[in-house]
Amino acid sequence: MGSTSGAAERAKPAAGGARPARRRLTVDRRREELMAAALELFSRRDAEYVSIDDVASAAGASRALVYHYFGGKQELYVAALKSAAAQLEARLRPQGGHPLDELTGGLTRYFDFVEEHATGFAALLKGGPANSSGEIGEVVDAVRHRLLKLIMKQMRVEEPGPVLRVTLRSWIASVETAGLDWLERRDIERPVLERMLIGQMVALLGVAAEHDSQVGELLDNLVRGGASRPADRERPGADG
């Protein structure tokens, strides 16, 4: 009787600040939690200073469980960055509409991701330059390549010439830098920053158009979008 009673008492949840029982999660959900914890840590510290024990503690899991799912820190880091990249790409899929509206809407969704997933965004981009070779560099390069493809799709461009390609890649770098700077300082309102970046795109295309007539046609379509748009009617000499 005494031993049975003692076992029953031990089976009862401890009161106060006792550690809660570990939740039973699906494989996918547990992986997501581990990757989210890793992104949080990797965004605040260099990967070399983050241990598997740190990730396990942040996720409320065991060290053995992290190794079971990912094999090691490098595998976990790559998986976490790929997760952040997939989330960002999903936000940026074209919604349909005029190219300039598409570009503006895509930039807004980009900064929605920056704001809502600050740790993932920071870890994704900060992981690139310091790890320009190997799997991590490939993840970051793949994100930039996909962003280039998405912008081309928004602009109705199948294959950019060298002038347009350099222009678009330069703009993507500006947007990335602006996102990191905004997360760090937040001393400019988001709508202002987004309008400024759209203005930069138009200005960059204007310079590129001086060197490539195809870019000039693209810029004309991007900014004016047809004779029915107000900018067309207000442009000096638009009536001939």
Image (cartoon, rainbow, N blue to C red):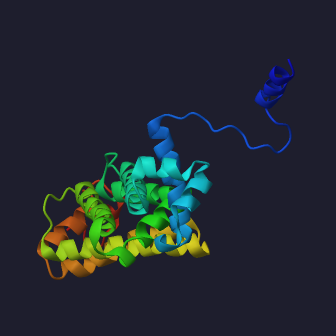
Q: At which x and y percent is residue 59?
A: 58, 51
Q: Residue furthest front?
A: 2
Total residue callouts: 0
Q: At which x and y percent is residue 111?
A: 48, 60
Q: Nearer the viewer, residue 32 or 14?
A: 14
Which residue does the image show at 56% across and 54% down from the upper left? 56
| Residue 191, visible in the rendered structure | no
Question: Residue 100 is drawn in which quadrant?
Answer: bottom left
Vertically, is 219 above or below 98?
A: below
Which residue does the image show at 52% across and 75% down from the upper left? 181
Q: Nearer the viewer, residue 8 or 56?
A: 8
Is 70 on the left-hand or right-hand side of 190? left
Is 171 on the left-hand or right-hand side of 195? left
Vertically, is 102 above or below 217?
A: above
Is 213 on the left-hand or right-hand side of 8? left
Which residue does the image show at 34% across and 54% down from the upper left? 102
Q: Nearer the viewer, residue 138 or 200?
A: 138
Where the N terminus falls, by quadrant? top right
Question: Residue 10 is drawn in which quadrant?
Answer: top right
Vertically, is 137 above or below 77?
A: below
Vertically, is 123 above or below 130?
A: above
Q: At which x and y percent is residue 51?
A: 52, 65
Q: At which x and y percent is residue 211?
A: 15, 82
Where the C terminus falls, by quadrant? bottom left
| Residue 42, visible in the rendered structure | yes
